Image (cartoon, rainbow, N blue to C red):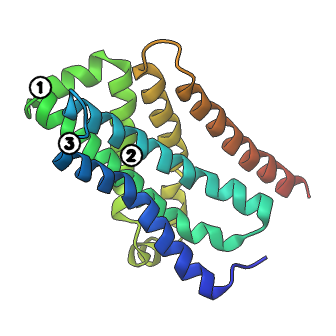
Amino acid sequence: MKIPSQWATSLRILLHLLCATPALVLIYNTFTGGLGFNPIETITHQTGIWALRILLVSLAITPLRILLNLVQLVTYRRLLGVWAFFYAFVHFSIYLTFDLQFSFPLVVDDIIQRPFMTAGFTALLLMIPLAITSTRGWQRRLKKNWGKLHKVVYVIGIAAVLHFVWLTKGNQPEPYIYVGLLILFYSVRLVNKFRSRTA
């Protein structure tokens, strides 16, 4: 099954617009007073949650490709990954700037002493080389190693979900929905890999 060429470009534009929308809404709310009583906390939470959501959508690409037999879907994974990194980077930058006021010793203490920070920082750190090498130029340079490097995204998914689970207070269902989705996506991939080996 193949996505028509005239739809492929439109889908790419649509994905960019959808990924940019949360940032545009935050900017609009910043200038219109729509961020509530604690604007910094709102922006920090929203950028973090959208980083996780877009990351999960990117991880859903392979299961969807398998189930729908749409090989072209893989081409949109990099686009989503870069957007996920953008929101994750903004999320961390706000925390570093406003919560810790660029105190790197406090950052280190947080990462060591607080498990949710350890998981979140691990996810961000691992996303950096993937964002840098997301271009076609790097894909040509790295060849087969590019695919091996970008499998790190599966570790990033686990770390990002753990960050949100450990950070969330109370019995809120949202973090566990993401846990369930992650398990589902990885299960589809593992079952397909097992079937390919035994076929």
For residue 24, what is the image quadrant?
bottom left
On the image, numbered disc 1 is attached to which residue?
105
For residue 174, what is the image quadrant?
top right
> Residue 171 has which mark?
none
Q: Distance from label 1 to label 2 (Cα)? A: 21 Å
The answer to the question of whether label 1 and label 2 lie on touching residues, with beta carbons closer than 8 A, is: no
Query: Which residue lies at the image location 63% right of the left edge and 68% below the top edge?
Result: 73
Rendered location of residue 131, percent (x, y) = 36, 59
Label located before the other in sequence (3 or 1) = 3
Rendered location of residue 55, percent (x, y) = 49, 49
Q: Distance from label 3 to label 2 (Cα)? A: 16 Å
On screen, residue 44 above or below 19: above
> Residue 93 has which mark?
3
Rendered location of residue 144, percent (x, y) = 54, 68
Type of amino acid under label 2: Leu
For residue 137, what is the image quadrant?
bottom left
